[in-house]
């Protein structure tokens, strides 16, 4: 009875996914490509760089998330933390990297601020502060960009009431056993939260290992990371180079799989046991206000500086070093953004449609699929996340060609939906699956069918999670470049394709201005989601303050009145 | 990102002088324009032409918008600018469509801005439709004698499969306040690098501006220029390129970041030059600096120049794939692009500043007058000869060797 | 080690939960707080343990106006981790990511590894759960979990023990057995304890019962 629907959903998603996967990885069965890859002089070092930057940035982001979560949890500021995240999440990756480069480059803002009075430099110094050969700039940029994402997914886990209350109680219990709040978090709450974050962690790891646009802007150049090389080869006109790129993409996908496997093997268990053995209670830092939130402040400060750099860069004309302020200001960049505003409608329409479809599919899937299916098929559904984007698009395009739908609106929509689906599923799953099953029982016992239950009880209660997931899907769709270009055969321009085309010309002001536009759209999506998902305002309880009169009549009217006859008002 | 095809044009000096006559007669299969053209124009009315062109410059995009307006008005053809990042994208798309069995008129690309290796690849794999260039009415104005590269693209004959659109030449530009004495050849460049270490760089090959710089050095230093005009051979490679590597070995230690890192593309080099991190930048558009000055992104003290003995120059073209659905519209568009009005506006620095492929002497007086323009600050004051590009087959081996020697994080 | 509680007022700016509650608990005895739901019994325990700001994140936390003295020392300025006050809830709240033995080990004060483990084994034996050390807490029955929770609270060597309706989830047969188990241990350890419940049968010492209700607290005779 209930099998046809999830089976149909599965087919609907799995067919394109598998088809695209087969087509993209089909290039891997070319021995010449592997040989060429092996013999390429840049290969080994590029691979090492990819592994190093991907893993280091993920570990750094993981550590930062844990620290910030601990602070937020202990100081009961999690809700505030969550509110500050959407602007950071909505920042386009490439724009963030460009802003960061502008801050840190030898001719960047930081050095301009201290030159020449502090450093005595009249022209930019030859220090490798960006595009450094060790990839440190890329690691920093990736960690800064991924920490808000991990924080956000952790916070969605905490949104489940039952879980949150229980962890809060366990945390208090651990404190009564003598543990300092921070250590109690590390030993009790974190080991339970961390395994639930494996999904987002895989997404972050995959992104770090396969990122192209950030690596181009701020990563090492000679040689670049393997992801950039694969991208360059796949974009080449020469089929042999394409095959080599596909092989490199395969290596990267393998690297992702191996990294995830290694991560799970990390002896977190052993470390936990070791700490239990000592029984150390942890330091009670100055009234447990450990480090007064400096980590969060640093994150916000960096993002603020990047935004400021982009904003100023977008109106800057001539701006030689070491001027702190541009010599000339010009709004030409914004004029050209205004001229390109037609693309905004296309972007909005495409993003809204694909987010809606992805949400509908995810809700239908989570609602009807048996748990076993869900757990077992997760690797398949996360395929677009893990495969390098440039390889994935090859597969999608091949599928579209075969179906003769390339260059048409349905193909474009399907591609965007397929890319948004894993993120939407990732964002929605914890809240949806954690929904108290007893509500269903109560609703049925009151005589309501499934449809009424969904419409009147479940979905209204899950409004926040649904809206947030849709916002994530929306943001993902806005950021798509290669799928729009290939499956739309270039017929449709979105804000991102415009931005990327103009970025190729290297004008900082244009790039910054378009980054502003690219940023505004997902931000609107998140703002809308926050508004839709706000909790219902109930009227305050009657007679909230009894003024301490202790009037028994009033006391009986209220819920918890401690009217004490005879006590002084 | 690989800044695509842009301004690569070819000009052949030596071999051409010999076979110039044969070439100017036109490739086989060309038809003289006539009553057929009226039929083409009639068929083009109402068609939508998807013109796949690099979109990295606002001026170019604005110019294409102007062309679209004119085409709509004059011929009822709707031109859509499909913004691409790299012509290689289009090559792959058409190749994939052919492999998927798309027949004539079932493709997605009507007209593509292309040249060099990308053209060579498309021609080799039969991805371009029947020859058309000489049959265009405006083709008679093209300067095929003075600009031989309009008929041979990187030493590969066009065979009428692509129609010339504009000229390009390797040009340098720098702020004259910081660089009062611009270097006039690669030897002077080396001396400058020694004097001011860490202030000069070029884009990393295979980004094509970087490749072009390397080709420039090659042309200046190689003992056997004639070998470069012929297809690549492994035996000749060592003899031809040894001086190149010797020069680069001497130059790199004095470059930015010790020659161990290179900027990604010409845009990055230009930005660094504007910031003061690098002394000079390079481009293929002789009028780029003037454009940037006019847009107030560079100070007015920036000047452009070309090496006294010549820098590499070539022609860029538009081509029509075999499966273009709006072929008639594409033909009308290509013809309009060759018209004196369109070429004059394109050569005008205030609009784009891309040099024309037409022979001004052949134009009637009123049309010739369209090409008068006052020089703007930052434009090249003394044009130098354009050296011909090496044969297209030399590009990849040179790039590979460069990467092997310098591109692996030595 | 007497526990002296003097609550002048307990509430926040929106409402006052209770006023004028005062009691004293000598070591080895159990004071029972009774009253209908919502009258603030659990909040009194929270005030003693120092976990008052642990309520719903959006609601304003309750504040205590008064003093809590354990053995003459005012616990007010101390954070929970330094009060040495144990807490037992309705739910056993065994940490699900640790085994039974690890849950117990968690509570033992720092010291030599071998002696800590020995204490854990001793506690398991005391509770009649020898051999259950490596089990996943979720596989234990309600009664077994409750026993482990008690042993865990006691292993930390608390100076006072607070019990928030710890028996309400157990069936009647188990209840009396478990009650005796808990009260015996409290007496053996010689610490004061406060028990909150709404079931008369749970009362440990009929002489030490405080009723919290609209009618006001009734002050137990101090000894």
Image (cartoon, rainbow, N blue to C red):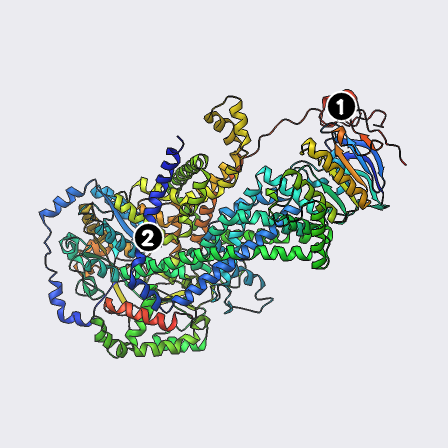
Q: Which residue is mark 2?
A: A24
- Residue B381 in view (yes/no): no
Q: Nearer the viewer, residue B191 or B371?
A: B191
Examine the rendered structure and indicate whether residue B4 appears above or below residue B81. below
Q: Is residue B236 visible?
A: yes
Mark 1 lies on residue: A555
The image shows residue A484 at horizontal and vertical percentages of 35, 46
Question: Which residue sits furthest right?
Answer: C223
Residue A372 disc label: none
The alpha-carbon separation of the residues under discs 1 and 2 comes to: 72 Å
Residue C55 percent coordinates (x, y)? 68, 38
Instruction: Bin the neighbour count of mark 2 within 10 Å (Cα to Cα): few under 14, some 14-19, many 20 and up.
Output: many
Q: Chain of mark 1?
A: A
Chain ID of residue with mark 2? A
Say left or right for A51 vs A272: left
Query: Which residue: 20% across, 62% down?
Result: B150
Image-based side of B28 in relation to C137, left or right: left
Q: Quick one: quadrant of the C terminus of chain C?
A: top right
Q: Position of residue A311 (x, y in %)?
A: 50, 51
> Are labels 1 and 2 on one chain?
yes
Position of residue A419 relative to residue A453, above or below, is below
Which quadrant would residue C208 be assigned to in this image? Answer: top right
Q: Secondary structure at mark 2?
A: helix
Instruction: Say whether disc 1 or disc 2 marks the residue closer to the N-terminus.
Output: 2
């Amino acid at each position: 009875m209930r099998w046809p629907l999830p089976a149909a959903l599965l087919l609907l998603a799995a067919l394109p996914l598998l088809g695209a996967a087969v087509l993209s990885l089909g290039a891997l069965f070319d021995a010449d490509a592997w040989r060429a890859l092996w013999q390429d002089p840049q290969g080994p070092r590029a691979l090492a760089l990819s592994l190093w930057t991907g893993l280091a940035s993920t570990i750094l982001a993981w550590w930062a998330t844990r620290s910030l979560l601990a602070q937020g949890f202990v100081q009961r500021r999690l809700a505030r933390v969550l509110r500050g995240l959407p602007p950071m999440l909505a920042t386009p990756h490439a724009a963030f990297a460009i802003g960061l480069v502008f801050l840190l480059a030898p001719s960047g803002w930081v050095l301009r601020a201290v030159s020449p009075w502090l450093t005595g430099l009249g022209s930019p110094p030859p220090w490798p502060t960006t595009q450094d050969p060790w990839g440190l700039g890329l690691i920093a940029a990736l960690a800064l960009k991924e920490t808000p994402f991990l924080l956000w997914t952790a916070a969605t886990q905490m949104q489940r009431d039952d879980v949150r209350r229980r962890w809060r109680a366990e945390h208090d219990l651990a404190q009564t056993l003598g543990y300092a709040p921070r250590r109690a978090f590390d030993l009790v709450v974190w080991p339970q939260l961390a395994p639930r974050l494996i999904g987002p962690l895989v997404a972050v790891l995959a992104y770090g290992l396969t990122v192209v646009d950030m690596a181009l802007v701020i990563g090492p150049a000679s040689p670049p990371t393997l992801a950039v090389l694969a991208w360059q080869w796949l974009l080449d006109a020469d089929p042999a180079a394409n095959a080599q790129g596909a092989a490199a993409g395969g290596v990267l996908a393998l690297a992702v799989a191996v990294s995830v496997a290694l991560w799970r093997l990390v002896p977190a268990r052993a470390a936990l046991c070791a700490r239990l053995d000592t029984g150390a209670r942890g330091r009670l830092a100055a009234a447990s206000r450990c480090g007064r939130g400096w980590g969060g402040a640093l994150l916000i400060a960096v993002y603020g500086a990047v935004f400021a750099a982009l904003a100023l860069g977008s109106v800057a004309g001539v701006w030689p070093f070491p001027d702190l302020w541009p010599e000339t200001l010009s709004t030409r960049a914004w004029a050209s953004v205004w001229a390109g505003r037609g693309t905004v409608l296309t972007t909005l329409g495409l993003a809204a449609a694909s987010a809606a479809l992805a949400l509908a599919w995810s809700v239908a899937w989570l609602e009807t699929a048996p748990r076993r299916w869900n757990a077992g098929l997760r690797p398949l559904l996360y395929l677009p996340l893990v495969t390098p984007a440039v390889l994935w698009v090859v597969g999608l395009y091949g599928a579209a060609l075969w179906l003769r739908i390339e260059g048409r609106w349905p193909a474009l929509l399907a591609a965007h939906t397929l890319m948004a689906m894993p993120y939407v599923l990732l964002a929605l799953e914890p809240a949806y699956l954690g929904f108290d099953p007893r509500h269903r029982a109560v609703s049925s016992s009151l005589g309501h069918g499934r449809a009424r239950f969904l419409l009147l009880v479940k979905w209204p209660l899950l409004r926040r999670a649904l809206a947030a997931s849709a916002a994530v899907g929306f943001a993902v769709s806005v950021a798509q470049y290669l799928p729009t270009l290939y499956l739309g055969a270039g017929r449709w321009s979105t804000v991102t394709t415009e931005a990327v085309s103009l970025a190729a010309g290297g004008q900082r002001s244009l790039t910054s201005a378009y980054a502003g536009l690219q940023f505004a759209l997902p931000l609107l999506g998140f703002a809308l989601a926050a508004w839709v998902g706000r909790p219902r305002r109930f009227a305050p309880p009657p007679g909230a303050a009894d003024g301490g009169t202790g009037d028994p009549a009033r006391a009986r009217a209220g819920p918890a009145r401690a009217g004490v006859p005879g006590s002084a008002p | 990102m690989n800044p695509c095809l842009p301004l690569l044009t070819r000009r052949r000096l030596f071999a051409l002088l010999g076979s110039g006559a044969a070439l100017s007669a036109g490739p086989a299969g060309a038809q003289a324009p006539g009553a057929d053209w009226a039929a083409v124009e009639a068929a083009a009315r109402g068609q939508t032409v998807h013109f796949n062109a690099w979109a990295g410059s606002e001026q170019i995009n604005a110019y294409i918008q102007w062309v679209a307006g004119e085409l709509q008005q004059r011929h009822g053809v709707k031109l859509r600018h499909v913004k691409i990042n790299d012509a290689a994208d289009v090559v792959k798309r058409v190749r994939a469509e052919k492999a998927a069995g798309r027949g004539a008129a079932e493709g997605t690309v009507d007209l593509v801005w292309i040249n060099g290796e990308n053209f060579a690849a498309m021609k080799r794999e039969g991805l371009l439709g029947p020859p058309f260039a000489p049959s265009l009415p405006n083709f008679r104005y093209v300067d095929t004698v003075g600009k031989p590269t309009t008929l041979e693209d990187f030493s590969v004959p066009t065979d009428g499969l692509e129609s010339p659109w504009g000229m390009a030449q390797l040009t340098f530009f720098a702020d004259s306040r910081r660089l009062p004495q611009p270097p006039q050849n690669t030897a002077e460049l080396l001396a400058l690098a020694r004097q001011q270490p860490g202030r000069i760089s070029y884009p990393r090959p295979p980004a094509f501006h970087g490749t072009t710089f390397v080709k420039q050095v090659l042309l200046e230093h190689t003992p056997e220029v004639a070998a470069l005009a012929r297809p690549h051979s492994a035996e000749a490679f060592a003899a031809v390129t040894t001086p190149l590597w010797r020069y680069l070995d001497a130059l790199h230690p004095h470059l930015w970041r010790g020659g161990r890192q290179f900027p990604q593309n010409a845009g990055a080099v230009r930005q660094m030059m504007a910031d003061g991190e690098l002394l000079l930048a390079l481009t293929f558009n002789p009028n780029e600096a003037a454009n940037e000055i006019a847009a107030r992104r560079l100070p007015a003290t920036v000047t452009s120049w070309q090496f006294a003995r010549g820098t590499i120059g070539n022609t860029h073209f538009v081509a029509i794939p075999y499966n273009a659905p709006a072929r008639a519209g594409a033909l009308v568009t290509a013809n309009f692009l060759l018209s004196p009005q369109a070429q004059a506006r394109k050569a005008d620095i205030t609009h784009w500043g891309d040099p024309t492929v037409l022979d001004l002497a052949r134009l009637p007086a009123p049309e010739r007058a369209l090409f008068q323009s006052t020089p703007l600050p930052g434009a090249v004051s003394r044009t130098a000869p354009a050296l011909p590009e090496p044969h297209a087959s030399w590009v990849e081996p040179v790039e590979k060797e460069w990467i092997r020697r310098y591109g692996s994080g030595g | 080690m007497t526990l002296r509680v003097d609550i002048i007022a307990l509430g926040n700016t929106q409402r006052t939960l209770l006023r004028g509650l005062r009691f004293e608990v000598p070591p080895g005895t159990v004071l029972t707080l009774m009253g209908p739901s919502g009258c603030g019994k659990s909040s009194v325990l929270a005030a003693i343990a120092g976990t008052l700001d642990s309520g719903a994140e959006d609601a304003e936390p309750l504040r205590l106006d008064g003093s809590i003295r354990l053995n003459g020392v005012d616990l007010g300025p101390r954070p929970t981790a330094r009060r040495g006050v144990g807490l037992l809830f309705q739910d056993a709240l065994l940490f699900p990511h640790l085994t039974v033995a690890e849950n117990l080990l968690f509570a033992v004060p720092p010291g030599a590894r071998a002696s800590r483990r020995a204490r854990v084994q001793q506690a398991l034996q005391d509770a009649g759960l020898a051999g259950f050390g490596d089990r996943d807490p979720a596989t234990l029955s309600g009664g077994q979990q409750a026993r482990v929770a008690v042993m865990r609270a006691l292993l930390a060597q608390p100076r006072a023990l607070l019990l928030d309706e710890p028996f309400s989830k157990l069936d009647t047969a188990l209840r009396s057995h478990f009650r005796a188990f808990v009260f015996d241990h409290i007496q053996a350890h010689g610490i004061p304890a406060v028990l909150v419940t709404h079931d008369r049968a749970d009362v440990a010492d009929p002489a030490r019962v405080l009723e919290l209700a609209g009618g006001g607290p009734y002050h137990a005779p101090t000894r």
